[in-house]
Amino acid sequence: MDFAQNLSNAIILGCTYLLMAAGLTMVYGVLKVLHIAHASVYTIGAFVGVLVYSWVGNFWLSLLIAMIFSGVFGILIYRFSYYYLLDVPRTVPLIASIGLFVMLTDLLQKPFLMGPYQRAFPAGGAGLPRIDTPWFSITSKQLLIFSVTIVLMVLVYLLLTRTRIGLGWQAASLDREMAAAVGINLNRIIALNFFIGSALAGAAGVLVGIYNNSVFATMGDLPSYKAFIIIVLGGMGSLPGAILASLLLAIVENFLVASIGYVLPRDSIAFLVLILMLMFRPHGLLGQE
Amino acid sequence: MYKKFFSGLIALIVLSMLVVACAPQTTATPEATQPPAAETAAPQVTEEPTMPATEQPTEAPQEPIKIGFFSPTTGFAAADGTSALQSAQLAVKIINENGGVLGRQLELVFYDDAAKPDQASAIARKLIEQDKVVAAVSGSYSGATRAAAPIFQEAGIPMLSAYAIHPDITKTGNMIYRIGTLANVEGRVGAELVGKVMNLKKVAILTVDNDFGISLTDGFKQHAAELGLEIVLEEKYPLGETEFRPIIGKIKSSGAEVVYATGYYNEAANLVTQMKDEGLNIPIIGQEGYDSPKFIELAGPAAEGVIITTDLNRDSDRPMTRTFLEQYKATYGEDADMVGASAFDAVMVLAYAIKTAGSTDPMAIVNAIANLKDFEDVATGPFWNFTADREVVRPVSSQIVKDGAFHLYHEFDDIKLVTP
Amino acid sequence: MSTGYLLTIFTFIAIYISLALSLNILVGFAGQISLGQAAFFGIGAYTSAVLAIRYSLPFTIDFISAILITGFVGLFLGLPSLRVRHDFLVLATMGINFVVISVFKYVDFFGGAMGLVNIPAPVLFGISFRGGVPYFILSSIYALLTLGLCWYISKTWSGLAFQTIRSDEDAAASVGVSSARYKIYAFGISAAIAGGAGSLYAHFIGSVFPDTFAFVESIAILSMVIFGGVGTLRGPIIGAIILRLTPELLRFISDYRFTLYGALLVLMMLFQPMGILGNGSWLWQKLHPNNRDVANTPQMEVK
């Protein structure tokens, strides 16, 4: 019973990691930029979600608005920073990204935005039921996270494999110059890429905000560090790899804590895995040389 | 062109930063800058004429008494730092509205230390040498307070630590006092609560891995051994943890009757919510880290029935507790918490000490604090006295969450139990 | 302004100049971006604190051991750089920072979360001093020695090799310079200098806590290097001075200092990726119209 419960809890945790990592790996796939400011997009998504929820009281509407807002915000980040930094050494956009992250986190903490305090996001399970089986239970919040993640990932999959612009995205993530040479509108692809990736991060922010019933200015820090680990494990730029790595990391973390306890904080365990991975399998679990 | 313009702009920003001179953020109340209201009102007050007329003109233009204050209003500890600062400002306002100290106004000189030791040590020197404060209050965490304490000690300026709990802070020397209950005392009270008041035996302990959590757990375990409690599980978890489900599974199978969980309100809110979700319905004992209206807001219905040990008794009818809770709510639109109450009390104790000493001489102030007895003008009091190790002795309260608010559960006033 | 306060600020600036210069050896000379310099800073501080408190060793031994031990750890932790490059290395160094901090936090020998306190004041030539003019002089001497070492590295053969690694790793391997060896050297030297700075910091503050050396500190040190001008000697110095001094001077906007730092980093990257005084930067070209250095810095130019 413990085993099944731990596994189901880990899968839900993996879903929250995945939404964050998916956006990050998509950005890396096309731009080859480590988008650290992604953490801020996640926080902003949660913030917009909680604001809209407090006005209209409807979870689905607040999720939608938060995703659109985050997506547009992601495009703005791209248009006003990375856009100018596509053909320079990769350290330049990286440092710009760190700058954006530091600036946005600090601004979000100011009283006229989120303030230093945490706020509740009492949307509950948005009316979904709680499932109790003899082996494990899934709370309504967990069911919500699980179903929203599945729906979003299926939508992204269909968009990337069944539409013209999605095929263009695939080409661009393989080779940006080549894609441009065969007449693919790179700007549109990259903008779409940022929109989808950031909207997913915004959704992750909203869902985690509801799951923990708390939204605060620095909530994006740890999930984003973890998302970096996931995209390395999964192979940078690989979406299936990110899915696998998210679930694997969450399962390993939860079972380690359940069996041994905290030898080191969860995040340090994850980073140790990362360092070993980089030493011995630098292209990820599914990545290719 | 575009590029040059912005380069110029950057250069300008940088230059302007270097040119601008420093200006400390002082938080003197408006009364401090205006001519004292008492002077114009004086003829109407009947007692006034009996005072020697010659004294008034010399007192009126006197400078305010400066008290240094540092707390983290940016960075990871910004919530606590802001609460501490606002409460200290409230204390200064109340004192000044009641005529100030020694006929002079109090002025709080504030700097943000971001809870960083290097910032705090620079701030301590700045407060001492540049602002010439007569005493200081640390509204910051242990690391920063620990770094600032030796500097105040060497300069011979009294410093009160509001809520930082590292045991070594007060060991710095005779100028350093602490207002908050020492964490291992609070841990002992937790064990007393479990063993004597609730009559439970099997305990699971969760410790947050910082100085706060570890000191609490140490105190708890020490007294638990004396009371013969059985510790069936002990786990340490990292600060900021949100996923307690794997640990909850372990608590379930450990057969614990009660959970003693150290931590802050955000971790605690997740813990109690997830315990309810996983169907684990045993009592949870928290401590002052939970003591924030945010805990009840974030944990919602799961907070009901949680018992905490804390310094702030919200059901107290002591006048200063009521004044603090009501005025804080009226001034800042939020409910006050324990951190704020401690910073408030630190300022109140300082004001009392200066008043009793009759001067701003550092040794006189320190002596007044050392000799303080049954002091009632504090929100978390009464303060019975300070020990020779400069730690406060006072009753510790336990509060239970009922109908979305903290209420008195049990008051611990056994001197032996609460003396560090 | 009062002297004691100014001396405190300037002592910190001297320590941070050493730190920024040490990171510059990695980032500027060897082209290895690291987000983990605070880990080495912390290892030095903890080495010194442990030796002084647990073994009551004198300051000179603490200080030298901090440099040597951190240097060795640096050589070891530099190993991932042989396997991974660029973004991967950034993540690996970031990971190292997290892991090192949690070791300080979880191992009781290092004081755990309670930190290590009551580090005795250093004694040199029979005089004990905490802070004041002597400590400022001590840290300034250390910063000057660091500067000298950096100058030496940048001028000698090994400096050339470092620069070769930075501009083109494959080319470096083909002309016979063992890039692996020099990358490891760069990590070792950089870590050793940061370790010495950590020792000075620990004895100055008198206590060490794990969170002081967290990831954000690494970002702060990197900002100093980038802001001043990566790959030069003057850049990290100017960067450390400006970024350490502004929050002190700008208390009235101190609440917004991180917003300002972040904005500056973004603006710098967009318009002056070489830093305010780096080779090829607008300001440096104004000051030195006929500068020859410009040709030597192909790495970070904007198109």
Image (cartoon, rainbow, N blue to C red):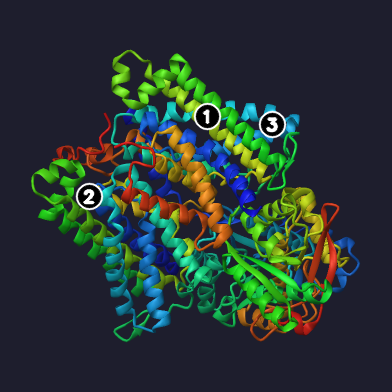
Along the line of sight, the residue nearer the viewer: C277 or B78: B78
User: How far separated are the C-alphas under marks 1 and 3?
Assistant: 16 Å
Residue C217 seen in the current view: no
For the point 57% across and 75% down, the residue is B169
* C-beta proximity under 8 Å, tags 1 and 2: no
Q: Quadrant of residue B343?
A: bottom right
User: How far separated are the C-alphas under marks 1 and 2?
Assistant: 36 Å
Q: Amino acid at mark 2?
A: Ala
Q: Is residue B329 above or below residue B98?
A: above
Is label 2 in a helix, a strand or a loop?
Answer: loop
Q: Chain of mark 1?
A: A
Residue at the spot of label 2: C30
Residue A245 image point, x, y percent: 46, 42
Residue at the spot of label 1: A73
Q: Is residue B87 above or below residue C202?
A: above
Residue C130 image point, x, y percent: 41, 76
Mark 2, Cα crowd under 10 Å, few <14 / some 14-19 / many 20+, is: many
* C-beta proximity under 8 Å, tags 1 and 3: no
Residue at the spot of label 3: A52
Mark 3, Cα crowd under 10 Å, few <14 / some 14-19 / many 20+, is: some
Q: Quadrant of residue C60?
A: bottom left
